[in-house]
């Protein structure tokens, strides 16, 4: 249990670090940290329930995108400000390192395994952000059309 607390705390710190590097406004730093920690909690929960690495990262990225959309409306700030620090804990740094280490050690099969794992995680992050953005824009457009609709549009 303590290992999970440490992981969430380091996810919070990692998100804070990226928010500071990207010169995020001070009033948004707390929201960026919470987004990174909450995204990592969602990842840990989905991995705990036995989902594979692609699906776990996809679910966590969908959560990060939804969180950034909520914070966009709440803080009146572009959603990119919140989505980038929120997905930072999901970036596959360790698998990329191990893939490069295996390449240097000339272990092709291990390098291929880690490269595939890195690609799956990176693909899940990109696909999750894309999927949520498209879904949100379609739903938003439908609600806007329904709001502006007259009872008899053809009369």
Image: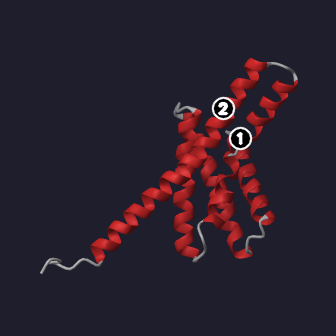
Q: How is the image coloured?
A: secondary structure
Which is more toward the observer, 123 or 27? 123
Q: Above or below — where is 142 with respect to 12?
A: below
The residue singled out by tag 2 in the image is 117
At 33% from the left edge and 66% from the top edge, which residue is drawn? 142
Give the residue drawn at x 53%, y 53%: 130
Relative vertical location of residue 93 with respect to residue 113 in this rendering, above or below: below
Q: Is residue 75 left or right of residue 138?
A: right
Q: Secondary structure at mark 2?
A: helix
- Give the mark, 1 or 2, whose residue is nearer the N terminus: 1
Q: Secondary structure at mark 1?
A: loop
Label 1 – label 2 distance at C-alpha: 8 Å
> Which disc number belongs to residue 20?
none
To which residue does mark 1 refer?
A: 92
Is 1 in front, or is 97?
A: 97
Q: Are marks 1 and 2 in contact (CB under 8 Å)?
A: yes
Q: Quadrant of residue 32?
A: bottom right
Reply above or below: 29 against 153.
Answer: above
Q: Residue 153's image quarter?
A: bottom left
Give left or right: position of 143 versus 126: left
Residue 100 x, y percent position in the rendering: 82, 31
């Amino acid at each position: 249990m303590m290992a999970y607390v440490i992981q969430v705390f380091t996810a919070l710190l990692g998100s804070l670090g990226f928010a500071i590097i990207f010169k995020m406004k001070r009033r948004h730093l707390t929201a960026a940290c919470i987004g990174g920690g909450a995204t990592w909690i969602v990842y840990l929960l989905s991995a705990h329930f036995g989902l594979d690495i692609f699906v776990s990262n996809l679910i966590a990225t969908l959560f990060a995108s939804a969180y950034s959309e909520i914070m966009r409306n709440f803080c009146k700030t572009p959603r990119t400000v919140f989505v980038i620090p929120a997905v930072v804990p999901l970036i596959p740094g360790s698998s990329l390192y191990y893939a490069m280490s295996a390449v240097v050690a000339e272990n092709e099969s291990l390098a291929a395994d880690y490269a595939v794992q890195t690609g799956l995680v990176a693909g899940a992050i990109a696909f999750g952000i894309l999927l949520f953005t498209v879904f949100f824009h379609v739903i938003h457009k439908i609600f806007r059309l329904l709001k502006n609709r007259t009872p008899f549009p053809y009369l």
